Image (cartoon, rainbow, N blue to C red):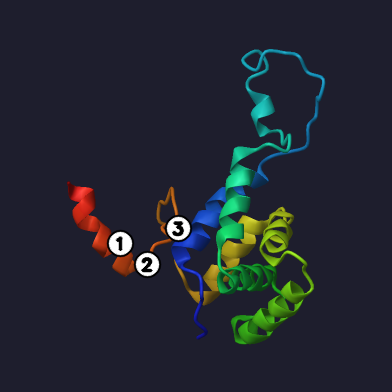
Amino acid sequence: MPELAISADKVAFIIEKAREFDVKEGDADPDSGSNAADDDMIDVLEDDGSDPTGLELGSFITALNEDEQLDLVALTWLGRGEGTIDDWDDLRSRAVEARATYRAPRRETARYLLGDPMLGDLLADGLDAFGIDWTDERTTADSSAPSQQDEDEPTKQR
């Protein structure tokens, strides 16, 4: 079985945020001057381009290293059914080739991934193909290495 360069916790965080982001819809009533409470807060589901979840998700993906981003793209394709777990090396090679065409690879990879309205589900299916359970309750992704976490423990207890 191939190894992932990105942790399951990070992918789970992206899945959860992507699903929050994916429920947004286009602005149905751009000139609405109504009170949000009067229209049952329905406007909260409209995407006006300044969605904090989308911005957080985009920033998180952009901050990932190259290998982590490549794994996300390959996981997305795996989840879409463009190959099986046995094709992982080929999927990842395709991701490397696609990334090589970008002028700003970090940002363009994030933009590519966020442009897929099913990103959360595709990544979940990709992790499922690896046999990785990502469904634990998570609210943040821990980007520090286990050794860094251990070193920080004494200071957290003070």
The span from disc 1 to disc 3 (Cα, nearest Å) is: 22 Å
Residue 11, horizontal then vertical, whole percent: 52, 62
In the rendered view, does 4 fall on the left or right side of 59? Answer: left
Could you tell me which secondary element the residue under label 3 belongs to?
Answer: loop
For the point 56% across and 54% down, the residue is 60
Could you tell me which secondary element the residue under label 1 belongs to?
Answer: helix
Could you tell which of marks 1 and 3 lies nearer the N-terminus? 3
In the rendered view, does 154 fall on the left or right side of 142? Answer: left
Residue 66 occupies quadrant: bottom right
Residue 48, horizontal then vertical, whole percent: 73, 34
The span from disc 2 to disc 1 (Cα, nearest Å) is: 6 Å
- Res. 83 visible in picture: no
Q: Mark 2 points at which residue?
A: 145
Q: Which of 33 and 152 is in front in this view?
A: 152
Looking at the rendered image, the disc whose residue lies closer to the viewer, 3 or 2, is: 2
Q: Mark 2 near mark 1, Cβ–Cβ under 8 Å?
A: yes
For the point 65% across and 13% down, the residue is 38
Could you tell which of marks 3 and 2 lies nearer the N-terminus? 3
Residue 37, horizontal then vertical, whole percent: 61, 15
Could you tell me which secondary element the residue under label 2 belongs to?
Answer: loop
Q: Which amino acid type is marked by label 1?
A: Gln
Q: Mark 1 points at which residue?
A: 149
In the rendered view, does 143 fall on the left or right side of 156? Answer: right
Q: Mark 3 points at which residue?
A: 135
Residue 94 occupies quadrant: bottom right
Looking at the rendered image, the disc whose residue lies closer to the viewer, 1 or 3, is: 1
The span from disc 3 to disc 2 (Cα, nearest Å) is: 21 Å
Classify 50 as above or below 92: above
Classify 141 as above or below 86: above
Q: Nearer the viewer, residue 150 or 29?
A: 150
